[in-house]
Amino acid sequence: SAIELADVVKEYHSHGEVVQAVKGVTLGIEEGEFFSLLGPSGCGKTTTMRMIAGFEAPSKGLVKLYGQDVTNVPPNKRDVNMVFQSYALFPHMSVWDNVAFGLKQRRTPKAEIDQRVGEMLEIVDLADRGKRMPRQLSGGQQQRVALARALVNRPRALLLDEPLGALDLKLRQAMQIELKRIQREVGITFVYVTHDQSEALTMSDRIAVMNDGAVEQLAGPREIYERPATAFVAGFIGTSNLLTGVATGGVLQVGGGRVLVPGVDGEVTVTVRPEKITIGTEEPAQGLSAVKGTVAEVVYLGTYNSYAVSLADGAEITVFQQNVHDATATAERGDSVWLSWQAQHSY
Ligand code: ADP
Ligand code: MG
């Protein structure tokens, strides 16, 4: 792996109390990978990132970069670069000079600086903005300058801590696509911190979902979405339905129906994605999970409808159903309906 964390723990001592910000994280990030640390605020993402960069020393465990133990190596001796959410550019320097700054400091020959800065501004699509001052640029353009400034040093890995957090939604979505394109183009490892699940799902090769200082699941976006490893991941990623109860002989009785959980006996939490559920008025076939409910709400969302269905036991299930012919819903508010899905779609 390009970046390895082995049972890394970080404890902070404040006011006589010990806070465990990171509780034994082990993971490997491959060279050239777009890797995300995803989780709610306070779960330890920034602390983990700062230990990779070297701004923080682990209380326990090892950090390795490219096979070398760097646990006690200072940040400037590590082949990584970090971009922060507050991407403070030098306000009195042009875009060009901002990007050239690091190279000048390292006394890189002028011809090489010109070539590398020019090339980098091309990559971030700001070739014609070199003479502008930061205040003359939009937020997204400023963020691309910050990115160019980090990338021009050719680090083997770039660490980005919520780099789009300050941008509005539309710009953020555009920048997500841009960032992914840039990463592919320069081919270096990106470690990306975000609390935004859709951002992580759309950009990443793999995602480590963190909760309370620990990694709950490490997998590709599709697997994380379709096969959440824990109830926390299921709840945090996208919309998911959670059904809980006691299963007997692989069947969980809920809402006047059955949820098939093959091989499970005892207390169980089952998750089902809204788009895996079929809504209908006919009683579904025996081999399917099937529950009965009443449509509480229908929301038309263009290509699909979103239904909120209340079960007899008070649970509410969200169903997304593709709009096949026209905007007419297959069920209306107040209708009694059956919801069904294949056993393989509940986890
Ligand atoms: P995230 O980036 O996921 O929001 P952080 O890594 O910033 O989470 O923080 C994880 C936990 O560690 C939080 O509870 C936070 O309050 C605590 N923490 C972070 N930095 C410090 C510090 N310097 N001193 C004490 N506690 C800290
Ligand atoms: Mg943070």
Image (tube, helix red, strand yellow):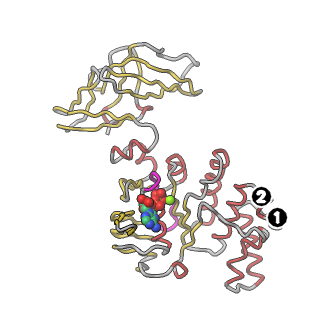
* Image position, residue 204 (x, y; %): 51, 55
Q: Which span is picked out in magenta?
A: 30-42
* Image position, residue 167 (x, y; %): 65, 51
Determine crowd level at label 1: few under 14, some 14-19, many 20+ residues with C-alpha closer than 10 A: some
* Mark 2 → mark 1, Cα distance in angstroms: 8 Å
| Magenta segment main secondary structure | loop
Determine crowd level at label 2: few under 14, some 14-19, many 20+ residues with C-alpha closer than 10 A: some
- Mark 2 and mark 1 in contact? Answer it, CB < 8 Å: yes
Instruction: Specify which label sits upstream in the sequence, 2 or 1.
Output: 1
Name above or below for residue 96 compared with residue 276. Answer: below
The image quadrant of residue 334 is: top left
Residue 29 visible within the image? no
Which residue matches tag 2?
137
What's under tag 2, amino acid-wise?
Leu
What's under tag 1, amino acid-wise?
Arg
Q: Residue 132 bears which disc, if any?
A: 1
Query: Which residue: 56% across, 57% down?
Result: 162
Tag count: 2
